[in-house]
Amino acid sequence: MIHPAAYYQGGKFVQIGGAPETARKLTMAYKILKAHSSGGDFRVKFDALASHDITYVGIIQTARASGLERFPVPYVLTNCHNSLCAVGGTINADDHAFGLSAARRYGGEFVPAHMAVIHQYMRERYAASGKMILASDSHTRYGPFGTLAIGEGGPEIVKQLLGRTYDLAPPPVWAVHVTGRRADGVGAQDIALKLIGEVFPKGLVKNCILEFIGDGIKHLDMDTRSGIDVMTTETTCLSSVWQTDEVVREWLALHGREDGYKRLAPDDGAYYDGVIELDLSKIEPMIALPFHPSNVHTVREFKKNARDILADISLAGIVDGGKVRVQQGIIGGCAGGLFGSIQNAAEILKNGAVGNGIFELSVYPSSQPMAMALTRDGTAARLMAAGVTVRTAFCGPCFGAGDVPVNKGLSIRHATRNFPNREGSKPASGQEAFVALMDARSIAATARNGGVLTAADELPDIKEISAPYAYDHTPYEKRVYYGCGKPDASAGLRFGPGIADWPAQIPLPDDIELTVAAVLLDEVTTTDELIPSGETSSYRSNPHHLAEFTLSRREPAYVARAKEIKKQIGGKGGSVIVARKPGDGSAREQAASCQRVLGGLANIAAEYATRRYRSNLINWGILPFICDDFDAIPWDAGDKITVRGIREAVKAGRTEIEALHNGSPFTLKLPDLTETERDTLLAGCLINYYKGGN
């Protein structure tokens, strides 16, 4: 249930209080932001940074071109995305070698492949109450520890590496009021999907901060809290933070970091821009499909109406005599590969079996210390005895670099995201597969039932267990390179043949001629559609090679069009993508930089799905135009857009700019640009901005 703006007073929400702009400062979020920033708006410097192996090469290359000398704060480089992606020969291993050499040269922390997924490592090693962490991955969320964490594109990491700030206008803050107690068989993913389904379709918390408060939190262990929290990215919120308690203190103490605990809670009188009631006792096992985390049904409702829900999708064959037959299950990553989820999955499968049919189940613990604990207490053995394959820490199933399902198959996953084709299938080649999101408990129940979709609460013997977790950091001590604060300027960077510099970009011209290279009129265009994940991830260290995949699964003619436009127009302008609402999903900067490599100079949108995509456009010198009359204009590929005096308009901070569409006048907008953003656009990209002495 959604409530309007309210004040938090004595554990309740009331309608009378102080001035909102003042009372908002009493929230946990604003207190943390204030402690990390200066200025009327927030100008933030983070306590730690993190990137994985499909982002850190480009980030370090950008920072190096901009004058990087050393990492000013702890910067963790994990290798959890291109661990298994066997594309392009040696290029994945070459990226890893580059990362290790950069950690030595600039003073960073290097986590080798298969040791940990990025977010579990940051939970175990860096998340702490009152801290702020920035990472180049959209699911950067460590709120249950009292950490305000934000996922952004690579250029925002570059700014921090060069001693600059993350500039943020005061964001709205929404309360998530957690009450009740979850039933046995209901897990973190069920709760998260319920929340996403409530708020995403209405666009309620876009670019907001969520604060989790309420008596229901005390009934949730840290794995469940983290599993809910990491999924808040799918609400399109900016970040999240939770009230802290003894459960947090004990978890940090177990990991040798009790000094990272502080009691956090909103002050009486704190103002919230809205309140989301989350009654845990009313949540049942959930499933998200077709193919977005917000398309949520209870498993019970889905099974009853599966044919109707799947009517427009080539999955009708999986419904057999009233039963939904699934071909694959996966539990892993920063959302599902947590100790509590895996233990409960193993308990459900105890004395059961996956069977020798087409259905298969794989489990990826999210870190080596966690895998070691699951091995020592017998959980891993119980899973293996049931026919489950237990694997190493790896993010591939979340973005299509591993475990691609069978053609026309349905995979149920306790993972973060299930956008179309994200799982690695290629419809253009006649290959189609699909992913539904579910909790580990219901995935295990389905496995126990031989792949027939089954909610955990359908089992007569379902019982939640909570076994103790024994953390042992020995795997990290034996393999991780701990170099933070110890740069060695004499250490050289190790390059492989797949690593290339960013191509030079020109400053923003005085006038621009734009040609439309793609028109995307869907309600939302995801970053997966703008630049696919999966096997393309291996090429993210080579801007020219990666750019060949731009929009390949959504508008295959785009690359050739963009190249031709660049050839014809030259330095007088470039191509433009017209999209109703682009940028939902990943923080990946390449969704913007690939356009720029191909000569892209602007996007025209009715709105942008996320702040981070808009930031990525700006940081790569791409004008993020808004058009209020978007639906009134008959857009088509090849349309000509003329904008006279654009450089002067940006320099002057004008928010409304007159332009021509095929010779007819219309208005474009550039709202809410900061001075730094204007200067970046004028320079042509962030690298040029820094080379200019800024």
Image (cartoon, rainbow, N blue to C red):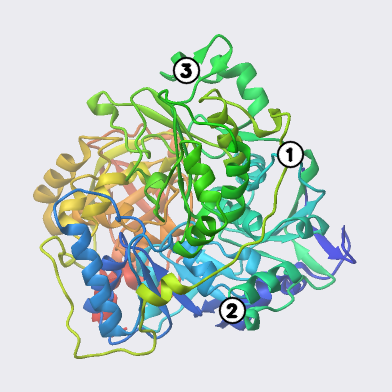
Residue at 55% across / 62% down in the picture? 141
Q: Mark 1 or mark 3, which is nearer the start of the sequence? A: 1
Q: Tell me the mark number nearer the camera, choosing from 3 and 2.
A: 2
| Drawn side of residue 259 relative to residue 85, left or right | right
- Residue nearest the observer in this picture, 88 or 159: 88
Label 1, secondary structure: give it: loop
Q: How many marks?
A: 3
Whether label 3 touches label 2, CB < 8 Å: no
| Drawn side of residue 591 relative to residue 147, left or right | left
Q: Give the Cα distance between marks 3 and 1.
A: 26 Å
The image's mark for residue 256 is: 2
What is the three-letter code of the residue carrying label 1?
A: Ile
Whether label 3 touches label 1, CB < 8 Å: no
267 up-or-down from 353: above or below: below
What is the three-letter code of the residue carrying label 3?
A: Ile
Residue at 40% across / 73% down in the picture? 76
What is the three-letter code of the residue carrying label 2?
A: Gly
In terms of image quadrants, where is residue 256? bottom right
In terms of image quadrants, where is residue 520? top left
| Drawn side of residue 240 relative to residue 310, left or right | right
Q: Mark 2 or mark 3, which is nearer the start of the sequence? A: 2
Give coordinates of residue 450: x percent, y percent: 52, 25
Q: Is residue 509 something that shows in the picture? A: no
Question: Residue under circle 3?
Answer: 318
Q: Give the Cα distance between marks 1 and 2.
A: 34 Å
Question: Residue under circle 1?
Answer: 283
